[in-house]
Image (tube, rainbow, N blue to C red):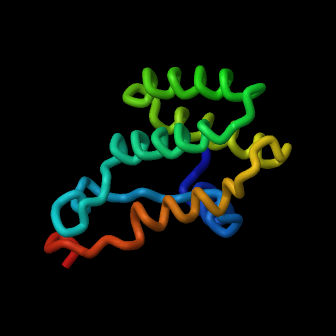
Amino acid sequence: MLNLDEGIEKISSEMKKRRLIVFVGSGISIPDPSNLPDWDGFITEFIQLCKAIGRLLPPEVKETFNNLLLDAESRKAKDPLKVASVLRDYLKDLDKNRTVNVNLQQRFERWFSELFASRSPNHYHE
């Protein structure tokens, strides 16, 4: 178990490596005009992105990935962080091995920006 200072150091290190995204709040970003997803909505949107990417995969990995997506759908409510991590790691391996002819990092960044960056603050943010 880490103490507070060790925890802050570990989190800071991961953020500097761009390996950590912090989600903080209690749903204040859900109402208009922000319309940002809650955690469940984010996982659902991420699975939809993965399905779109899955349609681009070659046949030799498509069946395995589709099975992974089915498992993700059934487990997303119980263990959303694990679902997101497993899907991300699988896609990273495909990208690293050049299995898919799409820049997955660029596609994820575009999706993430469209999902979050274009939103406006709502009255709770003030």
- Residue at the limit of the structure toward the bottom, as seen here: 126
- Residue at the limit of the structure toward the right, as seen here: 97
- Answer left or right for 112 relative to 24: right
Tell which of 107 and 125 is nearer to you. Answer: 107
Q: Is residue 108 above or below residue 55?
A: below
Residue drawn at x 71%, y 57% is 103
Quadrant of res 64: top right
Quadrant of res 28: bottom left
Q: Provide residue 63's location: percent of width, then percent of height.
A: 66, 22
Residue drawn at x 55%, y 34% is 82
Q: Is residue 35 above or below residue 61?
A: below
Q: Is residue 15 above or below residue 55?
A: below
Q: Provide residue 126's location: percent of width, then percent of height.
A: 19, 79
Count of numbered badges drawn on the protein = 0
Residue drawn at x 76%, y 41% is 94
- Answer left or right for 65 relative to 83: right
Quarter of the image where the N terminus is located: top right
Q: Provide residue 106's location: percent of width, then percent of height.
A: 64, 63
Q: Provide residue 100's location: percent of width, then percent of height.
A: 75, 44
